[in-house]
Image (cartoon, grey):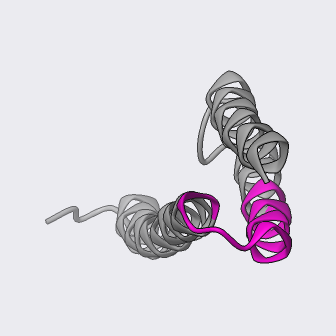
Amino acid sequence: MPNIKSAIKRVKTSEKRRALNASQKSALRTAVKSADQAIAGTDVAAAKAALVAATKKLDKAATKGLIHKNAAARKKSRLAKKLNALSAQA
């Protein structure tokens, strides 16, 4: 355990940030997973809505530095590609 006041504060803030990042990353994964499941279904409108929500979460996470911007772009691209295949099929 640190003895210096600034180091103690650093530990506290690091723990707070870690908890917040974990929460946001979990919400991001849930949004992406629900979009994937919606696209796997047959309802195109629900899939589009889920994709919009997932895209928003991905963009926000990339902006905040939670995930790399290219990783966000890659995930969005793959989801959009699946949705386009579903739309073409229907």
Left or right for 9, reference 38: left
Quadrant of the frame with the N terminus: bottom left
Q: Residue 14: horizontal and vertical position, in percent?
A: 43, 62
Tell me if residue 19 comes above or below residue 4 in the rendering: below
Q: Nearer the viewer, residue 29 or 62?
A: 29
Q: How many marks?
A: 0
Left or right for 83, reference 48: left
Quadrant of the frame with the C terminus: bottom right
| Residue at (74, 67) in percent of width and height | 47
Q: Residue 9: horizontal and vertical position, in percent?
A: 45, 70
Q: Nearer the viewer, residue 89 or 46?
A: 89
| Residue at (51, 66) in percent of width and height | 37
Q: Quadrant of residue 44?
A: bottom right
| Residue at (75, 44) in percent of width and height | 89
Q: Residue 36: horizontal and vertical position, in percent?
A: 55, 57
Q: Quadrant of residue 2?
A: bottom left
State which region is magenta: 39-56
Q: Nearer the viewer, residue 1 or 52?
A: 52
Tell me if residue 87 comes above or below residue 57 in the rendering: above
- Magenta includes 16? no
Pick out the residue farthest to the front: 90
Pick out the residue farthest to the top: 70
Left or right for 17, reference 90: left
Secondary structure mostly seen in magenta is: helix
Q: Residue 52: horizontal and vertical position, in percent?
A: 85, 63
